[in-house]
């Protein structure tokens, strides 16, 4: 299908060159050289992208873009300017422009940006007031606009992407969007949570195994790399991958070839890698628990997903999106009052979009009126776990995952090793709180005194060291 571009440029020679470049990529191009001409053409038809100069004969191309955005909110705009100043670049960014090109520009890069902008426009067509329903990402805040721009820049290439963000921000949704809109959309999208795979099975899960490779391997198994051949492999929670698996992953990324566990044959694979983590990899690299060379292989194009507290303007549209989804899944159709939406926007949402979605589903189920009001939201907020308790749960889980990722444990010793690692500070805390009194420490812990005494002996903890003297 032919894409339509509107070019607003008062330099005839530049306009001719740009038009030729766009037409070579199957664009139908309409040209004009003024703000008045632009407005006349926009009133007559729909465009997939507009490219506009800044200084035009009858006005400022940037200053009047607000009206264009209000009339055509889904049309991406690319700004061109010979005024190569920081102020011009900032003004272009503040208008929500898809891209800014100072003159002279690289024609190939400009045409490539126009193609990406048109593709992004085409993917969101027909969504109207429910923009985002066709694709999983929702939000018009500036932080999300920055995410969208980064996504469009990686659609027409196979560069490795590393998605960074807190839990619940939608990292897998970004990976899905890159796959669905990119050149590999006809291929498979395979997602694997590396933190959820037992340490001893992760290499088999990723690379597959041959029959008889290990006890229980009664048949050949195809791994995630082979399953994703021709498409995209999404490696979630990459920061929790054990070191030995990191080494094999690095080798696969460097060579484009894998070898099944227990196999001799090297297999060529053609996959795009998208990785994600909610962890700060820099201190893990410094501590030696994450390979620095693997980090640089993965961090070719980083995309930072903002937490919900940094894009509060997206909370209401997200809430209404979840209400529509809840209704499609059989829950009562609900509205949302403005006051209730304002109360939602005032919350920290430490679990981000995932937490908000769960909350809205509960509200749709439990609300007594057709419209969710402030009273319903306030009551459900009171029923949530205290933020401190929720944070403690997250921190404890992260600590356990971190310990598992860096501690080599012999086969058959994982349970007892983890138990010892977390029992030791727990018992020491109880003894510290009770001044070394084992009876009171056992009561504090809620266990039998004899059990405590045996565990202290097993762990080599001397209660006498906690007795308060003086």
Image: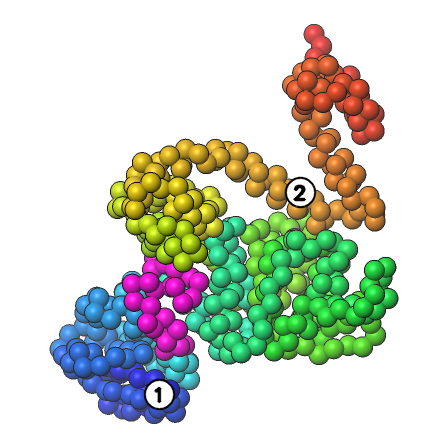
Q: From where the camera sits, is residue 466 visible?
A: no
Q: Is residue 350 left or right of residue 271?
A: left
Of the two numbered discs 1 and 2 in the rendering, the one whose residue sits closer to the viewer: 1
x and y percent of residue 436 in the render?
Answer: 72, 16
User: Does any portion of residue 418 appear in the rendered image?
Assistant: yes
Query: SS class of the residue under badge 2?
Result: helix
Q: What residue do we see at 46% from left, 73% from top?
A: 181
Confirm whether the magenta stretch covers residue 143: yes
Please state which of residues 252 and 52 is positioned toward the viewer in this rendering: 252
Residue at 21% x, 69% y: name it: 71
Indicate how the structure is coloured in the image. rainbow
Residue ID for mark 1: 2
Which segment did they paint magenta? 116-144
Tell me if mark 1 has few (under 14), some (14-19) or many (20+) residues whose alpha carbon lies within 10 angstroms of its own: few
21 or 368: nearer the viewer: 368
Up-down relation of residue 101 to residue 196 (above or below): below
Q: Which residue is mark 2?
A: 400
Question: Whole-Å distance between the Cαs marked 1 and 2?
Answer: 54 Å
């Amino acid at each position: 299908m032919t894409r339509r571009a509107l070019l607003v440029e008062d330099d005839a020679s530049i306009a001719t060159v740009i038009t030729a470049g766009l037409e070579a990529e199957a664009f139908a191009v309409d040209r004009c050289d003024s703000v008045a001409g632009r407005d006349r053409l926009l009133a007559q038809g729909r465009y997939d992208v507009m490219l506009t100069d800044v200084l035009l004969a009858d006005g400022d191309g940037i200053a009047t873009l607000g009206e264009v955005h209000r009339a055509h909110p889904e049309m991406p705009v690319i700004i061109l300017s010979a005024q190569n100043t920081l102020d011009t670049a900032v003004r272009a960014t503040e208008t929500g422009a898809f891209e800014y090109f100072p003159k002279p520009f690289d024609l190939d890069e400009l045409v490539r940006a126009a193609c990406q902008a048109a593709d992004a426009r085409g993917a969101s067509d027909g969504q109207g007031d429910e923009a985002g329903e066709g694709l999983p990402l929702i939000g018009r805040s500036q932080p999300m606009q920055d995410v969208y721009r980064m996504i469009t820049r990686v659609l027409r290439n196979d560069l490795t992407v590393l998605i960074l963000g807190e839990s619940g921000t939608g990292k897998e949704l970004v990976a899905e969007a890159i796959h669905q809109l990119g050149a590999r959309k006809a291929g498979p999208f395979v997602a694997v949570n590396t933190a959820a795979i037992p340490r001893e099975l992760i290499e088999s899960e990723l690379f597959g195994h041959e029959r008889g490779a290990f006890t229980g391997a009664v048949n050949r198994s195809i791994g995630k790399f082979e399953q994703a051949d021709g498409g995209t492999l999404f490696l979630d929670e990459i920061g929790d991958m054990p070191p030995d698996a990191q080494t094999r992953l690095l080798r696969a990324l460097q060579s484009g070839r894998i070898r099944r566990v227990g196999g001799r044959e090297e297999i060529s694979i053609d996959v795009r890698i998208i990785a994600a983590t909610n962890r700060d990899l820099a201190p893990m690299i410094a501590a030696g628990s994450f390979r620095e060379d693997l980090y640089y292989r993965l961090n070719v194009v980083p995309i930072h997903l903002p937490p919900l507290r940094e894009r509060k303007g997206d909370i209401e549209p997200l809430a209404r999106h979840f209400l529509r989804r809840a209704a499609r899944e059989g829950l009562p159709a609900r509205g949302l009052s403005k006051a209730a939406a304002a109360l939602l926007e005032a919350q920290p949402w430490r679990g981000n979009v995932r937490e908000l979605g769960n909350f809205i589903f509960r509200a749709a189920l439990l609300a007594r009126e057709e419209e969710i009001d402030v009273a319903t939201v306030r009551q459900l907020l009171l029923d949530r776990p205290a933020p401190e308790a929720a944070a403690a749960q997250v921190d404890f889980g992260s600590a356990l995952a971190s310990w598992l990722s860096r501690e080599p444990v012999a086969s058959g010793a994982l349970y007892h090793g983890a138990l010892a690692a977390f029992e030791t500070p727990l018992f020491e805390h109880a003894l510290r709180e009770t001044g070394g009194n084992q009876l009171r420490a056992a009561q504090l812990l809620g266990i039998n005194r004899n059990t405590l005494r045996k565990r202290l002996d097993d762990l080599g903890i001397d209660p006498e060291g906690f007795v308060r003297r003086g």
